[in-house]
């Protein structure tokens, strides 16, 4: 009987730890960190020369309407294959607004925003 009570207490303790795991609290802080990260990005400016250095599959930046996006992590997922690399390190505005893109791409692109193109 004592063994069953001890086992029940251990099981209860284990479930309590799972329920109140500190990882759940971290996610709230992560959102705040992401917000401040996005605020930092808005103040960054890049020259066209600097953007042009990021023109590879493993380091791919593009310009769309005078905004700079680091799409390196998306290159392999791009449904159009290597078409995204056609203007790597350069202005991709025309291609981005082409008929081949679904409207969801206009929401997705903001996840890759890193700054503005210097005027």
Image (cartoon, rainbow, N blue to C red):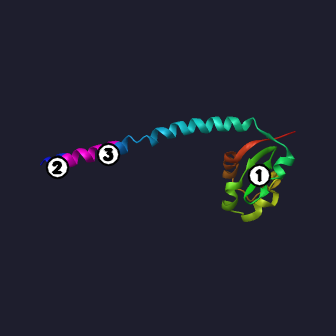
Q: Nearer the viewer, mark 3 or mark 2?
A: 2
Asked if 67 appears above or below 90 in the picture, the reply is: above
Q: Residues within 10 Å of mark 1 (few under 14, many from 20)?
A: many
Between discs 2 and 1, the one toward the N terminus: 2
Per the image, label 2 sits on a secondary structure element best described as helix
User: What mark, if any, has residue 4 been given in the picture?
Assistant: 2
Query: Residue at horizontal 61%, vertical 39%?
Result: 34
Q: CA distance from mark 2 to mark 1?
A: 61 Å
Between discs 3 and 2, the one toward the N terminus: 2
Provide the major secondary structure of the magenta segment: helix
**Frontmost residue, 7 versus 109:** 7
Per the image, label 1 sits on a secondary structure element best described as strand
**Frontmost residue, 4 versus 97:** 4
Query: Residue at horizontal 64%, vertical 34%?
Result: 36
Q: Residues within 10 Å of mark 2 (few under 14, many from 20)?
A: few
Return the residue at label 3: 15
Return the residue at label 1: 61
Between discs 1 and 3, the one toward the N terminus: 3
> Is 51 on the left or on the right of 104, as rendered?
right
- Residue range highlighted in magenta: 6-16
List x then y, in percent, for residue 60.
75, 55
List x then y, in percent, for residue 50.
83, 47
Quadrant placement of the C terminus:
top right
Query: Residue at horizontal 65%, vertical 38%?
Result: 37
Asked if the magenta segment contains residue 77, the reply would be: no
List x then y, in percent, for residue 31.
56, 38
């Amino acid at each position: 009987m004592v063994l069953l009570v001890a086992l029940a207490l251990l099981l209860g303790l284990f479930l309590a730890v799972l329920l109140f795991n500190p990882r759940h609290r971290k996610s709230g802080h992560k959102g705040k960190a992401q917000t401040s990260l996005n605020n930092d990005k808005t103040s960054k400016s890049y020259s066209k020369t600097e953007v042009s250095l990021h023109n590879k599959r493993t380091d791919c930046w593009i310009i769309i309407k005078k905004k700079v996006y680091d799409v390196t992590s998306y290159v392999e997922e791009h449904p159009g294959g290597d078409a995204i690399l056609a203007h790597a390190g350069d202005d991709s505005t025309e291609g981005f607004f082409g008929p081949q893109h679904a409207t969801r791409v206009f929401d997705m692109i903001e996840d890759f925003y890193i700054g503005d193109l210097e005027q």
